[in-house]
């Protein structure tokens, strides 16, 4: 009887642990998506409306080319900011 109780305790603990881990993972993924979206909204609305990019659908290569061109237009981005925005655009406005 005692052994069975111990088993249940261990199983419950494992389940709780698994839930916490999965919840944390999706929380982290949501946070990353949000950070990318914010960066896009902040950086890409400085010279024209966000409708310009939002009305398009492009492949990742297409978005890479466009963001590179925007940097040439004067859009101030570090390489990692550009990569984050390209990642976001490819996911949300992919072809
Ligand atoms: C420094 C100003 C500036 C910033 C910041 C900027 N753009 Fe632009 N954007 C322009 C100019 C100028 C044009 C028109 C000339 C051109 O197409 O290159 C343009 C045009 C566009 C177009 C329409 C042109 C086409 O070929 O479809 C899209 C889409 C676009 N921008 C997306 C973006 C995105 C995404 C960002 C953020 C990474 C961004 N822009 C940031 C200046 C800017």
Image (tube, rainbow, N blue to C red):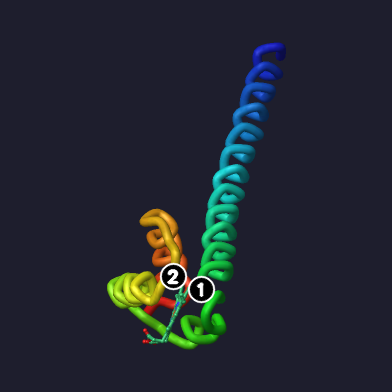
The residue closer to the viewer here, 35 or 29, is 35
Determine if the C-beta at disc 2 is less than 8 A from ligand 1. Answer: yes
In the rendered image, the vertical position of residue 43 relative to residue 11, given as above or below: below
Badge 2 is on which residue? 75
Viewer-side residue, 75 vs 53: 75
Q: Secondary structure at mark 2?
A: loop
**Residue 90 rendering spot, x and y as whole percentages:** 40, 71
Q: Residue at x 30, y 74 (%)?
A: 65
Question: Where residue 94 appears, x then y in whole percent?
Answer: 40, 76
Q: Mark 1 = which residue?
A: 44
**Disc 1 crowd, CA 10 A, few/some/many (<14, 14-19, 20+):** many
User: Looking at the image, is mark 1 or mark 2 earlier in the sequence?
Assistant: 1
**Residue 84 % position (x, y):** 44, 59
Q: Work out which residue is located at the far top of the displayed protein and give it.
A: 2
Please, is residue 45 above or below residue 12 in the view? Answer: below
The reply to whether the C-beta atoms of the residues labelled 1 and 2 are less than 8 Å apart is yes
**Left or right placement of residue 18 versus residue 82 in this view:** right
Residue located at (54% from left, 62% from top) = 39
């Amino acid at each position: 009887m005692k052994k069975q109780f111990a088993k249940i305790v261990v199983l419950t603990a494992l389940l709780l642990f698994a839930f916490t881990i999965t919840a944390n993972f999706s929380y982290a993924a949501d946070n990353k998506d949000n950070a990318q979206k914010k960066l896009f909204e902040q950086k890409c609305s400085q010279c024209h409306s966000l409708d310009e990019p939002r009305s398009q659908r492009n492949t990742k290569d297409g978005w890479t080319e466009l963001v590179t061109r925007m940097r040439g237009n004067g859009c101030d981005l570090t390489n990692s900011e550009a990569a984050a925005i390209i990642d976001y655009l490819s996911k949300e406005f992919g072809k």
